[in-house]
């Protein structure tokens, strides 16, 4: 499939590129600085562009895109709208290019709380130092949910780099819709693995899927 990737130079994006190419997909990676993408492949097209300059970006994109993967992230400790802005940009691109499928990331705070543990964790997250990121993801999820696209989101807890690249990449827990609470972690490689597999699998339409070790 032809995948449009937003957030290609970030922690998750680099692994989405690797996994998607390994699965014989064609990746169109958007980057403000293309030199940050070191991978080369006949199936990789790098488009220099800025999500805040949408008209120019849309004109630079091919018109044969099957799915958008958005893994844009920001500084979780500072007030920001970067995630919501990236979702709005993705939805605008999708409408312009007639793309219906969207895969992305969100936080566990956007899931439904399961039991007392889930409720307590949700409340703590919204009062914690990462509350700014929670608010940004809240807005982003509201945009996705209100849209007409076919979406699936990876509900991510703390994203922690693995000790070794590829360590247990395909071993993780998936839990749709409900977050049971507690401190959980996931690696960038594992998030990418789930999103790329979901391109073909299409197991969770219109759902947030919690992913953690």
Image: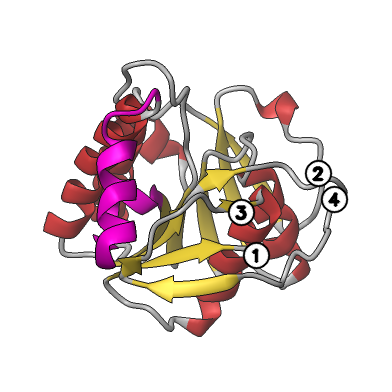
| Disc 3 to disc 1, C-alpha distance | 11 Å
Looking at the rendered image, the disc whose residue lies closer to the viewer, 3 or 1, is: 3
Give the mark nearest the N terminus, 3 or 1.
3
Residues shaded magenta: 106-129
Q: Residues within 10 Å of mark 1 (few under 14, many from 20)?
A: many
**Residue located beneath label 4 in the image:** 165
Instruction: Give the number of the disc on residue 193.
Output: 1
Residue 118 appears in which quarter of the rendering?
bottom left
Comparing 209 with 32, the one in front is 209
Q: Secondary structure at mark 2?
A: loop
| Marks 4 and 2 close (CB-CB < 8 Å) | no
Q: Earlier in the sequence, mark 4 or mark 2?
A: 2
Question: Closer to the N terminus: mark 4 or mark 1?
Answer: 4
Q: Is residue 142 found left or right of 208 in the rendered image? A: left
For mark 3, what is the residue? 186
Q: Is residue 190 left or right of residue 146?
A: right
In percent of the image, x 62 and y 45: which residue is there? 12
Q: Is residue 156 left or right of residue 31?
A: left
In the image, which is nearer the foreground, mark 4 or mark 2? 4
**CA–CA distance between discs 1 and 2?**
17 Å
Up-down relation of residue 108 to residue 115 (above or below): above
Mark 3 vs 2: CB contact within 8 A:
no
User: Helix, strand, or loop for circle 1?
Assistant: helix
Q: Residue at x 66, y 51 (%)?
A: 187
Q: Is residue 62 visible?
A: no
Q: Residues within 10 Å of mark 2 (few under 14, many from 20)?
A: few
């Amino acid at each position: 499939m032809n995948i449009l990737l937003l957030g290609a130079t970030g922690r998750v994006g680099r692994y989405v590129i690797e996994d998607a190419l390994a699965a014989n997909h064609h990746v169109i990676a958007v980057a403000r600085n293309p030199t940050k993408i070191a991978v080369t492949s006949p199936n990789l097209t790098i488009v220099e562009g800025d999500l805040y300059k949408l008209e120019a970006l849309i004109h630079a994109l091919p018109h044969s895109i099957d799915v958008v993967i958005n893994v844009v992230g920001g500084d979780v400790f500072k007030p920001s709208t970067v995630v919501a802005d990236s979702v709005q940009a993705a939805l605008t691109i999708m409408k312009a290019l007639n793309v219906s499928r969207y895969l992305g990331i969100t936080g566990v705070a956007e899931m439904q709380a399961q039991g007392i543990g889930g409720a307590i964790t949700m409340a703590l997250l919204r009062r914690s130092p990462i509350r700014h990121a929670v608010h940004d993801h809240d807005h982003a999820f509201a945009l996705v949910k209100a849209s007409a696209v076919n979406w699936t989101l990876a509900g991510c807890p703390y994203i922690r780099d693995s000790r070794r690249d590829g360590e247990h990449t395909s071993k993780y827990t998936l839990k749709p819709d409900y977050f049971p609470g507690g401190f959980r972690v996931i690696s960038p490689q594992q998030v990418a693995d789930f999103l790329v597999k979901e391109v073909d699998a299409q197991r969770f339409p219109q759902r947030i899927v919690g992913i953690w070790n």
